[in-house]
Image: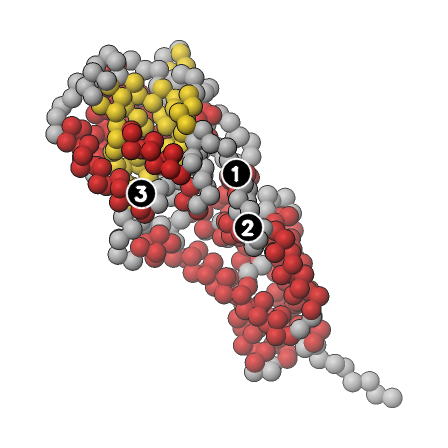
C-alpha cells in the first residue's frame, strides 16, 4: 500500500521539479481541469500486495498534470524498524509528474485505473488548494496505521473534507471481516498470509466497515453520489497487466505441511524442542509487540495462546531436568491450545493455523507423557 524506498528517492527528487508551480504560485485552474482518483494494481513485492491510491490533477490550459501520493516515508528515519513496529513512523505526501508516475507502474507491470471526480470547477480548485496546502504546511504528514490511516484513507479524508460532507463511505463487503477481506491479496504469498494471520489480533476480526484498501475505494466510488449525481465517472483503464500468481518452491502450503508433518512423525526430542523454541520466541515477540506497539491491529492477539511465551519456561526446566514442572507446563500449554482451537473455530484463519494446532498438540502431549511421574506398582 506504500511505495518502496527506491521509489521514494525518485519521488522526493520530483517534488522539487513540480512543487514550484504547486506552492510558489496561486494557480487558478481552468474549466478544462480534470481531477481523478488513481487506483494502482497489486504487485508481488510485500509493499505492493494491496495496491496503491493517489489523486491526479490535470489542467492542459495551465500545463499541469500532477499526481499526489500519500504513501511516502523516509527510510533513513532514526530507529526506522523500531518506529515501524511501534506504530509512530511518519508517512507523508509527495507530488510528482503524471508521466513519471505512469512510467514507474509500467516498469513494475502493475495496472493503473482512473476515476474522474464528477464535481464542479470550484470544488476541483478547492481540492487542488487543499492538496497543495497539505504538502506545504506539513499536514500531509501522518502516523501510518494499517487500517485506520494509510494512502487510501488519506485520499478519502481529503476528498470528503473538500466536499464538506462524508460523501465517500464504504458500501461493499461490510458484512465480512478485515481479515477475510485481506486474504485474496495473498495468492502466491503463503507465508505472508500466515504471518499476517498470526501477528494480527482481535481488531482484524471486526466487520470491515471502513475503507482501507485501494480497490475498496474504487468499488465504493462506483456507487456513491454527490449533489444527486454519481461522484465518480466510469472507471477508466490507463494501463493493464495480467496478474500472474508467483510460483515459489518454498513459499507455498506444501512446504508448510511437509515441515510440520516431519516434526509430528519423526518423533525426535531435539526436533520437538527446536519447534517449541521457535513457537516460544514468536510468542515473546507477540507479547513485546502487544505492549510496545501502537498498532491496534497487533493488540489483543489471542494467537499467543498457541505461540505461548511460557514455552520458554518449559524449555528451561527441560534442561534443568525438573520433570514435575515440565509436566505441569506441558499440561498448561495443551489446555491453551485447546482453548485457542475453540476460540478460532469461527475465524477466517482456522484452516491456515490448524496444522500448527495439531503439531503443537502432538509435541506437547509427547512431552507430557515423557515427563509424567510413574506410579510404582507394588506386588
Task: Quickly name the residue at label 1.
Answer: 244
Label placed on residue 7 = 3
Q: How far apart, in angstroms, are the residues tagged by discs 1 and 2? A: 12 Å
* Quadrant of the drawing holding the C terminus: bottom right
Q: Residue furthest front?
A: 107
Q: Residue at x 24, y 19 (%)?
A: 59
Answer with left or right where residue 102 lies relative to residue 322.
left
Q: Do tag 1 and tag 2 residues touch (Cβ < 8 Å)?
A: no
As helix, strand or loop, the secondary structure at mark 1 comes to loop
Asked whether residue 137 appears in the rendered view, the answer is no
Q: Residues within 10 Å of mark 3 (few under 14, many from 20)?
A: few
Q: Secondary structure at mark 3?
A: helix
- Under tag 2, what secondary structure? loop
Quarter of the image for residue 217 reads top left
* Residue in the foreground of this view, choosing between 277 and 24: 24
Mark 1 or mark 3: name the one nearer the start of the chain.
3
Which residue corresponds to mark 2? 248
Q: Nearer the viewer, residue 254 or 306?
A: 254
Residue 60 lies in quadrant? top left
Q: In the image, 353: left or right of 70?
A: right
Residue 13 percent across, percent down from the top left: 21, 41
Look at 22% across and 37% down and name the residue there.
Answer: 14
Amino acid at each position: 500500500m506504500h511505495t518502496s524506498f527506491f521509489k521514494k528517492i525518485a519521488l522526493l527528487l520530483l517534488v522539487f521539479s513540480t512543487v514550484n508551480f504547486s506552492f510558489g504560485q496561486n494557480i487558478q485552474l481552468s474549466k478544462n481541469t480534470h481531477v481523478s482518483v488513481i487506483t494502482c494494481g497489486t504487485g508481488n513485492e510485500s509493499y505492493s500486495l494491496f495496491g496503491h491510491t493517489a489523486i491526479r490533477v490535470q489542467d492542459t490550459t495551465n500545463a499541469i498534470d500532477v499526481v499526489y501520493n500519500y504513501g511516502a516515508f523516509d527510510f533513513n528515519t532514526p530507529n526506522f524498524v523500531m518506529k515501524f513496529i511501534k506504530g509512530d513512523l511518519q508517512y507523508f505526501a509527495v507530488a510528482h509528474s503524471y508521466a513519471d508516475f505512469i512510467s514507474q507502474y509500467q516498469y513494475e507491470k502493475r495496472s493503473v485505473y482512473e476515476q474522474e471526480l464528477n464535481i464542479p470547477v470550484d470544488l476541483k480548485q478547492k481540492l487542488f488548494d487543499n492538496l497543495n496546502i497539505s504538502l506545504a504546511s506539513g499536514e500531509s504528514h501522518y502516523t501510518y496505521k494499517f487500517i485506520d490511516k494509510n494512502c487510501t484513507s488519506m485520499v478519502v479524508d481529503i476528498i470528503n473534507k473538500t466536499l464538506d460532507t462524508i460523501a465517500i463511505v464504504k458500501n461493499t463487503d461490510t458484512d465480512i471481516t478485515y481479515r477475510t477481506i485481506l486474504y485474496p491479496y495473498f495468492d502466491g504469498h503463503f507465508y505472508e498470509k500466515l504471518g499476517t494471520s498470526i501477528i494480527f489480533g482481535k481488531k482484524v476480526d471486526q466487520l470491515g466497515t471502513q475503507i482501507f484498501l485501494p480497490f475498496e475505494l474504487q468499488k465504493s466510488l462506483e456507487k456513491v453520489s454527490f449533489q444527486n449525481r454519481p461522484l465518480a465517472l466510469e472507471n477508466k483503464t490507463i494501463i493493464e497487466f495480467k496478474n500472474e500468481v508467483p510460483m515459489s518452491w518454498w513459499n507455498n502450503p506444501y512446504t508448510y505441511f511437509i515441515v510440520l508433518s516431519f516434526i509430528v512423525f519423526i518423533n525426535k526430542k531435539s526436533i520437538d524442542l527446536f519447534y517449541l523454541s521457535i513457537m516460544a520466541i514468536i510468542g515473546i515477540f507477540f507479547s513485546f509487540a502487544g505492549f510496545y506497539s501502537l498498532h491496534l491491529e497487533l493488540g489483543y492477539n489471542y494467537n499467543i495462546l498457541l505461540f505461548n511465551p511460557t514455552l520458554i519456561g518449559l524449555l528451561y526446566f527441560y534442561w534443568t531436568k525438573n520433570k514435575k514442572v515440565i509436566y505441569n507446563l506441558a499440561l498448561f500449554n495443551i489446555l491453551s491450545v485447546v482453548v485457542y482451537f475453540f476460540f478460532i473455530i469461527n475465524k477466517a484463519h482456522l484452516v491456515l493455523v490448524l496444522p500448527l494446532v495439531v503439531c503443537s498438540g502432538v509435541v506437547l502431549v509427547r512431552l507430557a507423557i515423557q515427563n509424567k511421574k510413574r506410579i510404582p506398582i507394588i506386588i
